[in-house]
Amino acid sequence: MAVVPSIVFITNGKDGGLDIESTGPKSRVRLFVEGITAWPNWEQLEVLLGQMHIHPDKIDFVPGNGLYMVEFTMPEISPETIPVALVLGDRRSASTNLLVRRETFGARLRRLATGSSMLRVIKRVKMWSRTRMLEIK
């Protein structure tokens, strides 16, 4: 019986957490997979996200847990639960559900403000409010 790769767990590429809250060009997702080398030409596999075929940005072996890490850029999608699987030609792994949560307001503000003058304003307001709280105590 042929071994079919299986997705063991999914994390975000920013901090390795389980929450996937942002999508788009800066959002990375990591799939940790076992049995990937059972497929011939496994380096050419794709991620099937819903109906979208996505080429991984990289595939690495993680010796600490003995799994392969398949990292890809998350396309712009709305918050939802979406099936994710690995495909190679006519071969396909079992699907796993990927939950894309609604991004928190603070996270969205930080993402949008990165590289702009708005980020400096946010940091100043935070510093001012911390200083103010210390003065009140």
Image (spheres, helix red, strand yellow):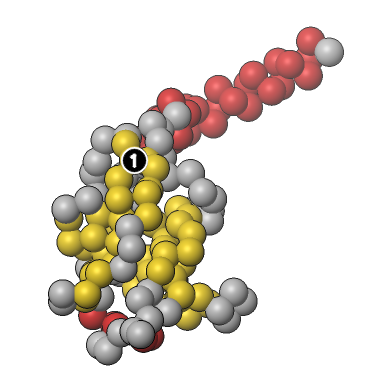
Q: Nearer the viewer, residue 17 or 48?
A: 48
Look at the numbered disc 1 and give the secondary structure of its residue: strand
Q: Is residue 74 above or below residue 53?
A: above
Q: At which x and y percent is residue 47?
A: 26, 64
Q: At which x and y percent is residue 21?
A: 41, 40
Residue positioned most to the front: 1
Q: Nearer the viewer, residue 24 or 81?
A: 81
Q: What residue is drawn where x is 22% and y is 51%?
A: 50
Q: What residue is drawn where x is 17% and y is 55%?
A: 52
Q: Nearer the viewer, residue 108 or 127?
A: 108
**Which image quadrant is residue 38 in?**
bottom left
How many numbered callouts? 1
Q: At which x and y percent is residue 16?
A: 53, 56
Q: At which x and y percent is residue 44?
A: 23, 80
Q: Is residue 91 above or below residue 107?
A: below
Residue positioned most to the bottom: 40
Query: Which image quarter holds the C terminus?
Result: top right
Q: Is residue 72 visible?
A: no
Residue holding disc 1:
81
Residue positioned most to the top: 136
Query: Which image quarter holds the N terminus?
Result: bottom left
